[in-house]
Amino acid sequence: MKKIIIAIDGFSSCGKSTMAKDLAREIGYIYIDSGAMYRAVTLYCIEQGLFDEAGNIDEETLKAHMNDIHISFQLNPETQRPVTYLNGVNVEDRIRSLEVSSHVSPVAALGFVREALVKQQQEMGKEKGIVMDGRDIGTAVFPEAELKIFVTASAEIRAQRRYDELKAKGQEASFEDILRNVEERDRIDQSRAVSPLRKADDAILLDNSYLTIAEQKEWLKTQFEKATHATC
Ligand SMILES: Nc1ncnc2c1ncn2[C@@H]1O[C@H](COP(=O)(O)OP(=O)(O)OP(=O)(O)O)[C@@H](O)[C@H]1O
Ligand SMILES: Nc1ccn([C@@H]2O[C@H](COP(=O)(O)O)[C@@H](O)[C@H]2O)c(=O)n1
């Protein structure tokens, strides 16, 4: 069967990567978490001391060092989940910290950062057979994607899911901090000048506030089957 490109966009923490990963594994497609790439650039900025105390980025230095930032993914053979590497180092856990979450959206709003990462993402999808999730996949990275999904859920439900996830991992978390972070990232992502978060006109809207993970997985599989039949 002809391979297609599947773009899954939407708000922070709504379940995009959960559904994208599951579908990719089931249909044998490559899965790319584009948010992990923005998170890796942000971790680089933190490690290189490019944020001042007020959280402002030293844009000129970051711009000069963009070519020193190499991001790659490897599949963990045990979990079959992709692991993010920054300059050859496994940073999967560190890029998920609240510190990175609190700094990532301003970094992702920089035009030169987006330009560099979008180029790499388009290269990854040139053979098709890819599921990519993010904020601008259906609008900017792959506007020609055969299947586009836009996922949403209420901010409180999304924050609760993240809170439960962190608690399950034994990590300290405050529901209020997580909710604030989710809302703040949504605000910055929707209002930035370059490729703001928005639903592509031809994307299918999914509000998964009251769907289980299994139900949304099933729903997505059905959308994939419809899209592949339509492109036959
Ligand atoms: N339908 C659902 N019901 C309950 N929990 C869910 C559902 N979908 C996903 N989750 C859980 O919500 C949390 C966030 O999901 P996930 O990481 O997939 O979101 P995301 O949209 O990719 O987030 P981000 O934008 O931060 O990358 C995870 O703990 C996941 O297991
Ligand atoms: N295509 C994308 C993906 C992500 N971002 C920005 O990165 C942040 C982290 O992404 P997560 O998917 O891991 O939550 C997100 O809040 C966006 O600011 C982006 O701009 N474009």
Image: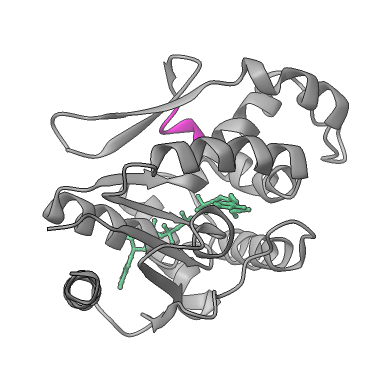
Secondary structure character of the magenta stretch overall: loop
- How far across and down, in percent of the image, does residue 64 sit? 79, 19
Q: Is residue 86 left or right of residue 217?
A: right
Residue placed farthest to the front in the image?
232
Q: Quadrant of residue 215?
A: bottom left
Q: Is residue 219 left or right of residue 161?
A: left
Q: Is residue 79 visible?
A: yes
Ligand 1 quadrant assignment: bottom left
Q: Height in image: 66 above or below 194?
A: above
Q: Quadrant of the C terminus?
A: bottom left
Identify the residue at image location x=64%, y=66%: 186
Identify the residue at image location x=62%, y=40%: 99
Q: Which residues are magenta?
A: 91-95
Q: Is residue 38 visible?
A: no
Identify the residue at image location x=59%, y=58%: 140
Q: Quadrant of the N terminus?
A: bottom left
Q: Height in image: 232 above or below 135?
A: below
Q: Height in image: 108 above or below 216?
A: above
Count of labels in the image? 0
Identify the residue at image location x=68%, y=61%: 189
- How far across and down, in percent of the image, does residue 48 sit? 71, 18
Q: Height in image: 122 above or below 216?
A: above
Q: Quadrant of residue 163?
A: bottom left
- How far across and down, in percent of the image, does residue 151 sit? 43, 74
- How far across and down, in percent of the image, does residue 114 sit? 66, 43
> In this orientation, which residue lies closer to the viewer: 39 or 200?
200
> In this orientation, which residue lies closer to the viewer: 196 or 230?
230
Q: Is residue 105 left or right of residue 94?
A: right
